[in-house]
């Protein structure tokens, strides 16, 4: 497997920047899916201004930047220096936004303040062993706090720890990182095993288009 930070730095160079505005003319917005202007928004987090919310694998910071813009105390953590550099360049002046470099599990274990919600959009929940991450999140969620995450649905028959490939140059082998794929009912079972309540895992259908897949969205409460 590739060094995680190197892999996600490589991915960062391939990922397009978030648009200056969305279809509604907004300069910040929240998106759970891989498609533009599709799906639910911050209502899944069930938080209001002043809440402390953690983005696990915040990437280039678009979702965390939006939360900060609406008055949430948004905290982001990512292992990629390049992703965080892009996040700081675009969103770093936003009051209430706090970005950190590091491993998701270690960051959670070292935090002492706790969170009203923790979320991951195609981020660290997908690429971290749930046996390590789910209890770490549970310990830092305040009573009633929400864990919400989204990722691609699993390929039929390919469950548990899988290989995810990040392409490089034409003459280089791709970098390989681990990801964890489960069917919706399996995610609900895993969350229950780690003390979560009100679990709900569903696949949101993709907008019309060729070869498009839906988005797995999972919610649970501490």
Image: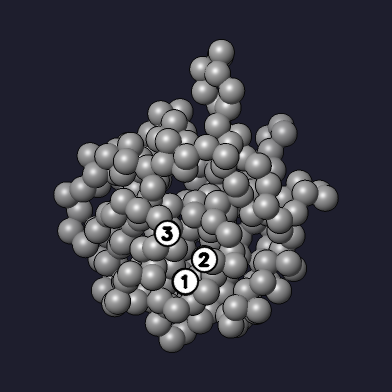
Query: CB of mark 1 within 8 Å of CB of mark 2?
Result: yes
Left or right, 66 with respect to 34, comes to left
Sequence-wise, the earlier of marks 3 and 1 is 3
Q: From the viewer's side, name the closer residue of 105 and 23.
A: 105
- State the residue in front, 69 or 176: 176
Q: Residues within 10 Å of mark 3 (few under 14, many from 20)?
A: many
Nearest the eye: 1 or 88? 1
- Residue 12 quadrant: top left
Asked whether residue 26 appears in the rendered view, the answer is no
Q: Percent position (x, y) of residue 45?
A: 45, 69
Instruction: Residue at 75%, 54% (x, y): give it.
Output: 159
Against 22, is 182 above or below? below
Q: Quadrant of the N terminus?
A: top right
Q: Are marks 2 and 3 in contact (CB under 8 Å)?
A: yes
How busy is the neighbourhood of tag 1: few (under 14 within 10 Å), some, or many (20 plus)? many
* Residue shown at the point (58%, 27%) measured from the top left: 174
How far is the residue under mark 2 from the one under mark 3?
8 Å
The residue under label 3 is 104
Whole-percent x, y for residue 148 in the image: 52, 66
Q: Is residue 89 left or right of residue 131?
A: left
Tell me the CA gap for discs 3 and 1: 9 Å
Give residue 133's mark. 2
Q: Secondary structure at mark 1?
A: helix
Disc 1 versus disc 2: distance between alpha carbons?
6 Å
Q: Residue at x 54, y 70 (%)?
A: 134
């Amino acid at each position: 497997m590739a060094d995680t930070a190197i892999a996600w730095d490589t991915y960062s160079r391939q990922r397009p920047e978030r648009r200056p505005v969305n279809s509604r003319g907004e300069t910040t917005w929240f998106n759970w899916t891989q498609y533009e202007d599709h799906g639910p928004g911050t209502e899944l987090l069930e938080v209001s201004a002043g809440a402390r919310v953690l983005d696990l694998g915040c990437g280039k910071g678009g979702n965390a930047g939006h939360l900060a813009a609406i008055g949430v105390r948004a905290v982001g953590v990512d292992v990629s220096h390049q992703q965080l550099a892009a996040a700081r360049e675009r969103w770093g002046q936003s009051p209430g936004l706090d970005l950190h470099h590091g491993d998701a599990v270690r960051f959670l274990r070292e935090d002492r303040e706790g969170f009203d919600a923790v979320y991951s959009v195609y981020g660290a929940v997908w690429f971290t062993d749930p046996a390590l991450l789910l209890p770490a999140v549970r310990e830092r969620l305040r009573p009633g706090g929400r864990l919400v995450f989204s990722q691609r649905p699993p390929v039929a028959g390919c469950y548990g720890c899988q290989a995810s490939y990040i392409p490089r140059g034409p003459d280089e082998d791709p970098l390989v990182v681990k990801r964890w794929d489960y069917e919706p009912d399996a995610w609900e079972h895993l969350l229950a095993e780690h003390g979560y309540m009100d679990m709900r895992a569903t696949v949101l259908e993709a907008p019309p288009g060729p070869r498009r897949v839906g988005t797995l969205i999972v919610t649970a409460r501490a």
